[in-house]
Amino acid sequence: MTKSEELFQRAVKRIPGGVNSPVRAYGSVTEAPRFIQGAVGCKIFDVDGNEYIDYIDSWGPMILGHNNEQIKDAVIRASENGLSFGCATEVEVEMAEFICDKIPHIDMIRMVNSGTEAVMSALRVARGYTGKNKIIKFAGCYHGHTDAMLVSAGSGVMTSGVPDSAGVPKGCTQDTMLAVYNDLSSVEKLFLESDNQVAAVIVEPVGANMGVVPPADGFLQGLRDLCDKYHALLIFDEVITGFRLSFSGAAGFYGITPDLVTYGKIIGAGMPVGAYGGRKEIMEMVAPAGPVYQAGTLSGNPIAMAAGLTQLKILWEDQDIYKRLYQKGELLYEGIRKIFLEKGVDYQVNSVSSLGCIFFTPNKVTDYISAKTSDTTEFSKYFQYMLNHGIHMAPSQFEAMFLSDAHTEAEIQETLDCIEKYF
């Protein structure tokens, strides 16, 4: 028995399912989770001494690679002054100024402790600002585990087979309206049915929690136009795409201006943190400036802010990183497509820059329904082979692969060789 297996046996006795987040569970791939001891660059190491090329990147934020020296030094320096104060600190101001100065669609920003909290707060602000109650979301888009958003959610909810969640009263979701990703007509239909009560449309600008599903041409602009037409706010959930597709996220990558945007752990270089921001007149609704209450006693933690600000400054000063990430995405995902073509494999490869996913289905994947046609049994076999050959990916058909600036051509080619041998 491996040490990971022993740790998992201990964990299931004290932690529900043996993990502290369902996305870490290996149940759908019939394995025990690998317990990780350390990581550097694009490599991750488990407690049994195994080395893997990592394509999880802590679910996205390790855009510079694991254990970056500049970020680590910033954390060490900040921790010398203390770990947490529950009071205002200078670095919070510096972080807010840096983001608002550099991202055109953010005038003000509020730090929180997770992407889930950021989304929950942004929705409350949208309702407070518009005076309306209904929210339009898309099937397969995951926006955290707040009650109102656990309606046809993606991410771990898809893998576990839980369409919504026990413990969520019907009243909590009665104002959540469900549209079809990449289908503007389904959105306008909901606007018309709502009796002018839609406060906001929230969307992952690139669907990345049902696998990777890029927006169709004109889809995001169509959402912007519909929100303007019906006087609703457009919220981009950039927990995954923020500071990854470009410095200004998917909004900058696609040239669309949202009213509000939410971020997750990328803001803290992988530390547990989040943020939401947008136009000044909207954000001034937030307490104590306005009547929309939101609080977090440890929001803007100085250690997380030091880590996050260091990473954001690196990304801002070297935006060739985004060109390199795009090129690495082309190398990996086009390489997989070439293998499939040569081998006669009838599966799909969806990608946007450094984000990508193989769907084990012959059907083109454009939304939640088509993503669900994937053969999860075949994915499980593929996952086990790749893991046992040193490639570390999410243990779910419905999650993204993440490249970092630390991945080299050699490691990408090693990954492609492994994929080719499997097929």
Image (cartoon, grey):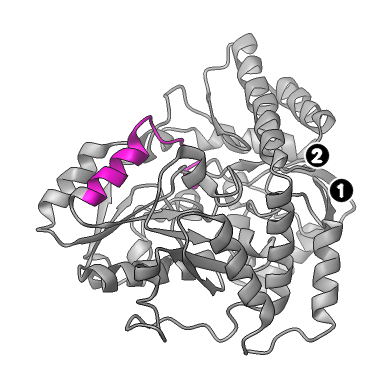
Secondary structure type for disc 2: loop
Q: Are marks 2 and 1 in contact (CB under 8 Å)?
A: yes
Residue 407 as seen in the image, left or right of residue 261: right
Callout 2 amino acid: Gly
Local crowd at mark 2 within 10 Å, few (<14), some, or many (≥20)? some
Quadrant where the N terminus sits is: bottom right
**Pointer 2: what residue?**
390
Q: Position of residue 89 (x, y in %)?
A: 66, 83
Q: Is residue 263 left or right of residue 133?
A: right
x, y percentage for residue 212?
51, 38
State the residue position of label 1.
50
* Towards the viewer: 238 or 319: 319
Residue at the image position 46 percent from the left and 35 percent from the top:
214
- Up the image or down, 28 lies above or below 80; here it is above
Residue 24 position (above or below residue 255): below
Residue 227 vertical placement versus 281 (above, below): above
* Alpha carbon separation for disc pair 2 and 1: 8 Å
The tag earlier along the polypeptide, 2 or 1, is 1
Q: From the viewer's perspective, is 392 left or right of 159?
A: right
* Residue lying furthest front: 101
The three-letter code of the residue at mark 1 reads Asn
Disc marking residue 244: none
Q: Nearer the viewer, residue 112 or 37?
A: 112
Q: Which residues are magenta?
A: 209-228
